[in-house]
Amino acid sequence: MNNHLKFNSLFFLFLILVFTGATSLSEAQTLGGLSDLLKKKENTNQQKLPVPHTDKDKYTPKNTPEHHEEQNSDTQDYFFRDYSLSDPELSTKINQDMSGAVTPVGLQYYDGYLEIMYLGADAFRMQSWSVDFFEGAEAITNGVTDLIQNQGLTPLGITTDENGRFYFLSIKGNTQVTAWQLIESQLDLQAVSRDIEPYLQQNYIPVGICIYQNWYYTLLMQVPNTTASSWNIEGYNNFDSMKLSMDNAIKKSQIPFGYLDASGVYNVLYLGF
């Protein structure tokens, strides 16, 4: 896999093929320097948001309070939804939006809210979903491994809050993987590229990005038979610039597959096929 994006393939046709691969988890990978980073916050108990693993029902998305502009999932290639973590109907509202013909691929925490970026197509034949958070390296290792190995879920989004909780957005569908990695890098996209490159040679795919305490984290999934052949991370100074670039990327079959917002500076992770 390389990090140059020049493709003309159909957008969602190839997205469906991203994660078709082996059917069992071979091993859980270690977390690099994360253990030292979070040693003061160690908590080996898995903690979960009140979010059920439910089958999807028929649903037409309705307006919800948003940090970004409202977009109609029936007509957009992607859109964003915000959810308050203090909302007693949190799980119901997320489940309603997940029940449309969508694929959740990005997760961002800010000020007590979770923002989810959706692609406007059910690319993985999604059956169920989950949002979980873990504190500490051991809890993250055990928790993410359990999501993949025992629950049949695939994490597709990652974010952190100010207390060191790492949130993972996962789905169950046509998303089988064999292993995973969470790679820590300096706040430099060249460093990120250098640090994840050895894993890309082993059929890992970057699926999520986030920043915590001045470190950059890239979530990777190992998919032996993936059709993904390239990746790229781009930075923007505002949301409008990010949206314009994403619109142009989609026209070139470059798929936005993760994003982060760090004090108004946006990064988007793209995959190419």
Image: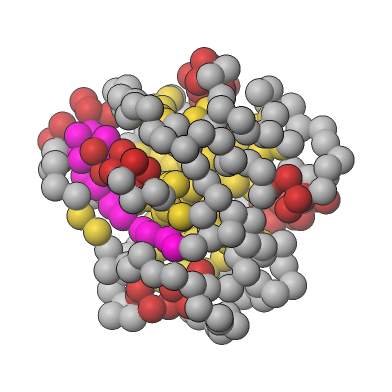
Tell me the residue at 68%/47% (across/down).
15
Of the pair 45 and 246, the residue shown nearer to us: 45
Asked which quadrant contains residue 54, the reply is bottom left
Provide the residue span drawn in magenta.
128-141
For the N terminus, the quadrant is: top right
Tell me the residue at 59%/40% (across/down).
20
Q: Is residue 7 visible?
A: yes
From what the image shows, is residue 8 above or below residue 127? Answer: above
Measured from the top left, where is residue 224 in percent x and y? Answer: 56, 27
Left or right: where 235 falls relative to 262: right
Measured from the top left, where is residue 248 in percent x and y? Answer: 80, 50
Left or right: where 124 falls relative to 162: right
Left or right: where 159 falls relative to 136: right
Tell me the residue at 72%/37% (across/down).
272
For the C terminus, the quadrant is: top right
Measured from the top left, where is residue 115 in percent x and y? Answer: 47, 62
Of the pair 75 and 38, the residue shown nearer to us: 75
From what the image shows, is residue 14 above or below residue 178? Answer: below
Q: Magenta stretch containing residue 163, yes or no?
A: no
Left or right: where 201 falls relative to 171: right
